[in-house]
Image (tube, coloured by chain):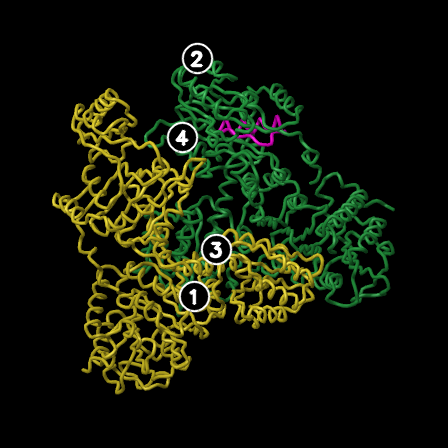
Chain colours: A green, B yellow
């Protein structure tokens, strides 16, 4: 019972995956003598792709299967087994695993279904398996997956039941749907996308997408990483890992389940403003992950990244031999954030020097249906030399007289010149891409090419910008903050009183109007006199969270009698729903924005800012980021709002303190860091003033952390 | 010189196109003895597809071409020629046309380029040609096009230079880009989309998309019409024609040039709110035209329409043998306006009765990778019977053990049962769609199928709704309106004075606050006393159009001294930029919306409504329709605004008069109908009150109509 030959390298987490990708011997448990069974197909595929190591069928009685010597159990195999692929009925899996562990197998891939995806009982069975496998220092891919493959010629391993073995290349992919994996491999082969490796992670009971990311981070054969995700195991870890890797290797993700995101029952605006799909967007954005909307887009982007350099900007030139497709390309570029370049006068003059008079040298550059291959080559070279061009889309519709392959060769030659700028082809014909374009990604229509280039340009822009930092704020009062929250938790948590909420916000240095709490009409009048007129009075109480709807607020009270009248009215109309009257200095200047945070069951704390006041309901104008928020995040969040125009000298008004708004976002992030028990936090309106901000209305709910929210141990 | 055998039927405009589609003899002018020339290719294609009539090459010297007897000129041809296809250099076209007209040819298609697309001189040449052709009672397709084809076996005519002849079917298409036409025919053949006819209209010097629409309206072989458009000749006529045809035959359009739409220099909000691409959207929406975003989407929608009935609603069921693609389909459905159905308990029970336990009978219905063909068939039948289901997407990923063709047969059989509900297949594999699915549209990925179904469902919804009517408004004062506008035109047009603008708006019965014009501080005080406090004072003058920016407005003046103070301040600060002071009753209640109109050079008058006040700049929340606006249009416009929530009991407030807002939209439409000289009209804010509306601020610019705006004669 040698625990594992790999124990020595277990210290580095990614190394535990090495036996999956670089095995010298693979046992296939469940290989049967008839084809079209999963185990037999895995066996067959390993042999068919010429796996360089030993393939060992495990079968209760057979002597040989597909010509290979079979054993009854893994523990009978004389040589060391690096990887066991299990494809037996669910009920037999535990026995097979025990056998593998007894033999010291360091990597197991369970293809069999019938575990975590099948209700409570299946989840329990899966948990037992995982614990046993981990205890033995072994790792598990699956269960409920389609296996994995590695095209490295040193291994040439197709340990999946898919008949498709993709061409070798620099793309690695992890998929959470096995069936989709089948379609993906098929599509990739059709598009001639080269794969380095491919893993179907199934229920990801042990090895997760995060583990694979870390593995591929150090894999020299991998330069583009694709993910198909349905759920996140540990979004915080994903965020940290992906953020680091994205700086060097692009990660492209298709995340499904947008529709399941749905609406959340939330008492706060913050909660209602952002769906969990917005949180996914925020996570991806923060980590530099390129999110695509469709399966085909995933591959359109991957092809671009796998074959071409990153563009230095969003300015694209379009070269075409037909007007219509050129216009369609320009439309799609503009719709997805690219800018059709304004060519330099020099480039235009040089184009004119050899193109026919009817050609159009503006952008799109239309070299006409009669364009011979060398016009494509010369025009493309000129466009790539133009300082105003970051990338080029080359459109070709085969007219009668032109040889498609020659055009492709001319494009390929011009594109390979050391411009360092990406080029893609759009060959509008039903045949496959010309072979001459092996290094230039080739699309059948203008729109997908434009979308792919736009996604890549946005990623390149992300990468060019400096990484943000979570700034150290020196003027916080962490002990006071903890004291306020803990006192609320001691009475069982829930919504803080207005006084508590204001005090908690003050601990992170967010400005607010002076206010006093009164419990009587006289008290309100006295408080107003102390604060100075005009004042606002708010009836406060747990039942009065949305003050406007309850008519629980009176603004702009200019003298003592107005204050008394308002206090009396509120007391009369709200009676016992009211705990007291908060008398507050009026803030009549500035713009109404909002800032808040919510603790999401999956994503943890998310910080939100947006337009406030009435606009919050009407615009749903919000931006969010996962905690902790960096300075770059905060600036981007504020800049992304439609309402930011209110801060930038709107309609001739003076500019307001946009920086202080961003600072407030960072302070809210710091507050939930100090007090992770904050479940919902709403500052609405947060008045952004010519200098600083003022938190006019604050609501905060706290709850004790339950165990699930302790720092997760799962990777 | 017999003018034309077709003179007798010229009375009905569509009949003049008949010789293009149903010729008995076609002359090809420019047929040469070498292949790969356009004329020779047309000749070759006509012969190759087995054109049922006579094909007559015209060549200056050749006796025969491609085995057919050739003539030097059309006028030498002994038999009548119904259609002449001209493919000679531009300089020789006029002579060829004269020859055709001399012979009484009723239909000419000019493929040659070098006309309207080539600057001023080319446009002039084209105009001369068109006049000559029309004078002779002949019609022209092109120039600068790729020809036309008709798959009707009675004609079997490929009069294009494209080598691709699509399968026969019920789709007709017109394209404004010849090159795109080549790609389109190629793609259509690949997708096995059957065409009835196909016309490349090139410069549409004579025959336009509108003419073809009218032709196809009465063509029994055509049930779906596709358009690729780059520009509109006569949008008003297109709107009328398409609106009529769309009730019976769907029209699907790809309109390029969004990016060229660009921003318009406009002094009014109305002008800035909507781009000409918004006008295209409005036109298409009013006419029931399905707009697609990409070339592939055009065909995805066409296939759906050509092969399946219209759905009765937006509720879609998803049937799949794999989880991941099911989620992707649900995401795409939701993102594009479909609703994933909640199945009835009965359906669920019936599904459970034969599906394995692990199958999921919620929606998506996941029948697992092991699903045999008959599970597909039975499940699909049950879903189609469910009252809660309007359409079904069937996803299939070929697993190991299932025969794809048998699954396709089961789906086809279930889909053809008389449910009257549309079904489409999503077969995720690189092979072509199974032949068994000839009647069921088949896609390779979930997203395009969902988008196509969503577009079709929206169209079906449009068709189910009653046509709107332009209501007859009885309380208008048309003569007064004309008098106001004509008096302004007499001084050269331009912006109306505040008094004129208010008076003009009053002629169509839109409510406004009482106001008086003062020219002095004393006069303002007097006016305020007459109107009753509080009042607003606005400095008026041509240079003060955006009053907020100029601080040219004082609100809520509660007594005589406040009025005097405000009037004095305005007089001091604005001095000579000011023509007078408009004293107006304050409207403190209600919500600020806007309504307006603009006269677009291409689209004519467009009516706009939106959120007003500050929101107009922040939200850009507007809806527009081409004049004249129907009751249905107006209700839809108002309902489409985000700001409509302000009218519907926002945050506990009382509901406001949404109907009166819609009525104001109709009255603005009526006003531009009475006074087409209105170039820009802005009512902002239009206060929507608990009862009625009040136009607080009105700006109107008029200009004499120039000739181009006279009712266009071009079709």
Foreground mark, 3 or 4?
A: 4
Q: Secondary structure at mark 2?
A: helix
Task: Give the letter of the chain under mark 1.
Answer: B
Residue that appears at 72% across and 45% down = A206
Image spot of residue A658 (x, y percent):
44, 28
User: Which region shows up in magenta?
Assistant: A662-683
Magenta stretch encompasses residue A192? no
Residue under label 2: A529
Q: Nearer the viewer, mark 2 or mark 1?
A: 2
Q: Which residue is mark 3?
A: A448
Q: Chain of mark 2?
A: A
Can residue A665 be found in the magenta stretch? yes
Crowd rating for badge 1 (residues with CA inside 10 Å; few <14, some 14–19, many 20+): many
Choose between A169 and B110: the one closer to the eye.
B110
N-term mark: 3 or 2: 3
Chain ID at mark 4: A
Dot 2: within a 10 Å radius of its alpha carbon, few (fewer than 14), some, or many (20 or more) residues? some
Q: Horizontal and vertical percent for residue A486?
A: 65, 23
In the rendered structure, are the residues bearing label 3 and label 2 in contact, judged by CB atoms less than 8 Å apart?
no
């Amino acid at each position: 019972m040698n625990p594992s030959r790999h124990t020595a390298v277990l210290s580095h987490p990614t190394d535990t995956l090495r036996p999956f990708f670089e095995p010298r011997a693979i046992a296939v448990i469940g290989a049967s003598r008839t084809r079209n069974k999963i185990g037999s197909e895995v066996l067959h595929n390993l042999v068919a792709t010429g796996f360089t190591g030993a393939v060992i069928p495990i079968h209760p009685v057979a002597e040989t299967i597909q010509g290979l010597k079979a054993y009854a159990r893994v523990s009978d195999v004389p040589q060391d087994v690096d990887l066991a692929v299990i494809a037996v009925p669910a009920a037999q899996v535990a026995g097979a695993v025990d056998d593998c562990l007894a033999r010291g197998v360091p990597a197991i891939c369970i293809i069999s279904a019938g575990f975590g995806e099948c209700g409570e009982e299946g989840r329990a069975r899966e948990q037992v398996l995982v614990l046993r496998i981990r205890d033995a220092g072994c790792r598990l891919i699956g269960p409920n997956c389609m296996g994995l493959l590695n095209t490295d010629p040193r291994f040439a391993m197709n340990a999946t039941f898919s008949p498709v073995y993709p061409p070798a290349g620099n793309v690695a992919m992890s998929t959470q749907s096995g069936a989709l994996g089948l379609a993906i491999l098929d599509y990739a082969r059709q598009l001639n996308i080269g794969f380095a490796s491919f893993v179907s992670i199934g229920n990801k009971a042990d090895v997760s997408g995060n583990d694979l990311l870390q593995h591929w981070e150090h894999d020299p054969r991998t330069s583009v990483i694709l993910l198909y995700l349905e759920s996140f195991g540990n979004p915080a870890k994903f965020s940290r890992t992906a953020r680091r890797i994205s700086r060097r290797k692009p990660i492209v993700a298709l995340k499904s389940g947008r529709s399941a995101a749905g609406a959340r029952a939330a008492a706060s605006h913050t909660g209602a403003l952002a769906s969990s799909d917005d949180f996914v967007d925020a996570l991806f954005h923060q980590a530099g992950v390129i999110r695509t909307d469709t399966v085909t887009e995933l591959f359109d982007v991957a092809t671009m990244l796998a074959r071409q350099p990153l563009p230095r900007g969003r300015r694209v030139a379009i070269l075409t031999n037909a007007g219509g497709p050129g216009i369609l390309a320009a439309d799609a570029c503009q719709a997805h954030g690219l800018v059709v370049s304004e060519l330099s006068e020099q480039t235009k003059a040089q184009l004119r020097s050899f193109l026919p008079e009817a050609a159009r040298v503006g952008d799109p550059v239309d070299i006409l249906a009669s364009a011979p291959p060398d016009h494509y080559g010369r025009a493309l070279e000129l466009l790539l030399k133009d300082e105003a061009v970051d990338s080029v889309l080359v459109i070709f519709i085969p007219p009668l007289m032109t040889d498609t392959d020659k055009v492709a060769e001319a494009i390929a030659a011009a594109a390979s010149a050391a411009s360092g700028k990406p080029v893609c082809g759009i060959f509008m014909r039903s045949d496959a891409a010309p072979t001459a374009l092996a290094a230039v990604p080739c699309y059948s229509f203008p729109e997908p090419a434009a979308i792919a280039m736009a996604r890549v340009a946005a990623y390149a822009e992300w990468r060019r910008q400096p990484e943000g930092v979570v700034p150290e704020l020196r003027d916080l009062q962490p002990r006071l903050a903890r004291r306020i929250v803990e006192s609320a938790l001691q009475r069982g948590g829930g919504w803080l009183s207005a006084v508590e909420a204001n005090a908690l916000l003050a601990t992170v240095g967010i400005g607010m109007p002076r206010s006093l709490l009164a419990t009587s009409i006289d008290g309100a009048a006295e408080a107003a006199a102390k604060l100075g007129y005009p004042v606002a009075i708010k009836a406060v109480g747990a039942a009065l969270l949305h003050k406007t709807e309850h008519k629980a607020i009176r603004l702009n009270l200019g003298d003592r009698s107005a204050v008394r009248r308002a206090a009396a009215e509120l007391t009369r109309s709200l009676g016992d729903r009211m705990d007291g009257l908060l008398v507050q200095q009026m803030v009549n200047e500035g713009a109404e924005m909002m800032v808040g945070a919510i603790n999401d069951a999956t994503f943890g704390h998310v910080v939100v800012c947006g337009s406030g006041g009435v606009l919050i309901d009407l615009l749903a104008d919000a931006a969010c980021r996962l905690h902790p928020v960096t300075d770059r995040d905060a600036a981007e969040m504020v800049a992304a709002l439609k309402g930011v125009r209110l801060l930038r000298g709107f309609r001739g008004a003076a500019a307001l303190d946009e920086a202080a708004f961003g600072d407030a976002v960072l302070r809210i992030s710091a507050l939930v860091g100090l007090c992770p028990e904050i479940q919902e936090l709403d500052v609405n309106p947060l008045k952004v003033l010519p200098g600083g901000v003022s938190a006019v209305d604050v609501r905060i709910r706290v709850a004790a952390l339950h165990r699930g929210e302790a720092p997760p141990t799962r990777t």
